[in-house]
Amino acid sequence: MPQHDTVTAELDALLHRRILILDGAMGTMIQRHKLDEAAFRGERFMDWKQDLKGHNDLLNLTQPSIIEDIHRQYLEAGADLVETNTFNSQSISLADYHMDSLGYELAKAGAECARRAVATVCATQSGRRCFVAGAIGPTTKTSSISTDVNNPAARGTTYEALVTAYADQVRGLLDGGADILMVETIFDTLNAKAAFFAIQQVFDAGARRAPIMASVTFIQAGSNRGVTGQTVEAFWNSISHVPLLSVGMNCALGPKEMRPLIEELSTIAPIYVSSHPNAGLPNPLLPTGFPETPDTLAPQLREWARNGWLNIVGGCCGTTPAHIKLIAEAVRDLPPRVPPVIKPYTRLSGLEAVTIRPESNFVNIGERTNVTGSPAFAKLILAGDYESALSVARQQVEGGGQIIDINMDEGMLDSKAAVEKFLRLVASEPDICRVPIMVDSSKWEVLETGLRNIQGKAIVNSISLKEGEAKFVEQATLVRRYGAAVIVMAFDERGQADTLDRKKEICARAYRILTERVGFPPQDIIFDPNILTVATGIDEHNNYAVDFIEATRWIKENLPCAKVSGGVSNISFSFRGNNGVREAMHAAFLYHAIKAGLDMGIVNAGQLAVYEEVPKDLLALVEDVLLNRRPEATERLVAFAETVKQQGKAAVKDDEWRNGAVEDRLAHALVKGITDYIDRDVEEARQKYPKPLQIIEGPLMAGMNVVGDLFGSGKMFLPQVVKSARVMKKAVAYLQPFMEAEKQRSGAARSNGKILLATVKGDVHDIGKNIVGVVLGCNNYDVIDLGVMVSCEKILATAREQEVDII
């Protein structure tokens, strides 16, 4: 059995039986030795032209006996795993000391120190098995955060440089005898993804394989976001492609602050979970610099273990062998956490996580950040106006795009440079990069550049069998290694699939190759069976929409867990210039395709028509074309389209709703997302209804009920609901001062109670909460509104502090 398999099997057996103990802080113990500059230099670096005091990794070469002794103390305190003193042993961090070339040597020496300590201790304790974990730090640079306040696209390092540096460190750790590789103190997920990529690269080159551990750090107390803004779940989704032994948290926070984060991680990670917190938040006024003593830290970690959150536990900054000894004793009699079984859903991430479940509504992929599909966006990029280009991306997200498609395939562009710059700028805009990215190109080198600049879990659009199986497997393997899901076009060596049978044949073949040869998770495979243009006047094209819909149905029934997507606007290209007809075609096509199982689609998120609102005569003609119901369908729709040019008859039709009763106008405005007349119509309703609250509980809620029904039946999509919510919010805001005035006139009635409202962590939608708050306030309740994305801890703390009656 290969050594990797032996170590993995041993660890797995131990982790099934008990909680394993990790060591404590190396830096804290080194500080106790009070080493001076000469001690750090040793003989070899006596004449180095730079101060070396504080360069802890260098001690692997200059003071190996001290490092070995620290490892020995932790092992004797009960540690099962000791981390090597190699946190910064790679060229990027070592450049600060002008020691770029020493990465491999320091990593190897660090692993050898730990290896010797393990051999010494285990030789005296028969049957004891301990492991060396090769520590791989985050480097001193970040690939996701700008290094220049005046240039958001500036970076301190690149993905390629990180991979090179990490690969050198990994080779040293393995050659020095590390049993495990631990990528730890992750503060930039893109850096970590580069480390994982480097590890796999080293394995592929023939090095001994080793189990991999990952550990992230969150630095802000009370926040559920890391340094770059990712949530815990978004982070996990971003690295879930790596075959990890465990995932965990370390450093930065003490146990009190880390507690809710490790609890969340333990519920979502289907692998072992580790934790090694600091001994509290640093406090330079304390003798040790940290508030948690062994006696106070160990009971807290015991509680985590008792709650079923831990498989591996230890300490980080400020912890010592005394801490580790009591932690080991505290958890000794407690069973290890049992990793949960996670359903095979498509899980993506930007700064926030997106999960596509069987019951999820259609996922909108914003299409306007595409130079091929949007002349306006292309003009901005070609002019170098990236600031305005970012506004287009922001509009797509604000309009309800749950993913944004980014494409820079333009003949006059350096596509690689353009996609890199734009993605780096997007990463500096939290309101945009909170959603996952779909990097879109027909050029593999552009796709790869995109993946090297995305910290979240992205989607690649696209690969295909066009160049044969070998190229397909090569690209799919790399997509998986970069940590992305993939769109597979129905295209093979014979060309594009344009019939139902060809779509089924190609998708089935690609699915087999991906799942059986590449090991691609089926839930991360997204098929695009080609939405092709109908109503072209060519008879062979008449069944294109039907073939796509039926191919979608077949894929969902025969290729388990796979998803289906498509570029929706392609269907109506024959009617370019006539947006009224095109929007009707998109609404009708989506309605039927979603019923067949379409999961997502590239759409203009801000301009989706509502199926139910398409005029019945136009809808009938459109569906005749899409469903190929009659031979003359194209001619009939073309003739009708000539009569509804946007500047003519259609514009008159659009204003007819203004002639209805005020209740009907309010409902129409809500369904269509029209804010233009809402203040005027609400004021008219105010003259009709005795109390402002009656308008909210009457016509406004009636309109929102229609929106809810349409959304639930698949005739309306999230971007349209977002627009409806904006209309409702504006209407309520208009009524608010009148309700306050009425409350004043009626006198200060006795409060009926105090109610706390909040939208829970993980959710940013607040329209329902806001309406409830207004209604409660009008009925003499004191309302405390905490806003959106509120943690359980904050809700409970505020409830106690404010002595509320209801949450």
Image (cartoon, grey):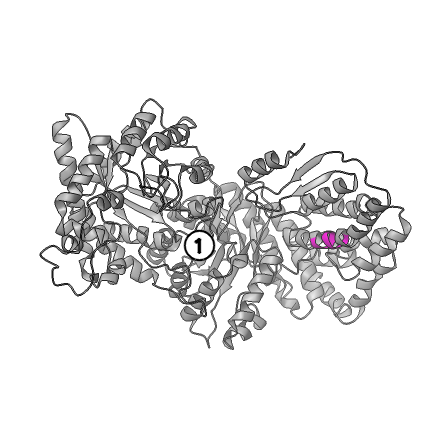
Q: The residue under label 1 is which amino acid type?
A: Thr
Residue 5 colored magenta? no
- Count the numbered circles shown: 1
Q: Kindly indicate the quadrant of the structure image that contains residue 298.
A: top left
Residue 489 appearing in the image: yes
Q: Which residues are magenta?
A: 726-731
Residue 666 or residue 138, whichever sits in front: 138
Residue at 38% of width from left, 48% of height from top? 513
Find residue 535 and report its horizontal and vertical position in percent.
65, 64
State which quarter of the image contains the C terminus: top right
Relative to 575, 557 lies left or right? left
Q: Quadrant of the N terminus?
A: top left
Residue 464 lies, with reference to residue 321, above or below; the image says below
Relative to 47, residue 671 above or below: above
Residue 695, image x, y percentages: 83, 47
x and y, in percent, of residue 767 in the image: 68, 47
Name above or below for residue 801 compared with residue 710.
Answer: above
Question: Taken as a whole, is the magenta stretch helix, strand or loop?
Answer: helix
- Note whether residue 537 is visible: no
Can you name the residue that lies furthest to the left here? 43
> For mark 1, what is the residue?
228
Q: Nearer the viewer, residue 434 or 650?
A: 434
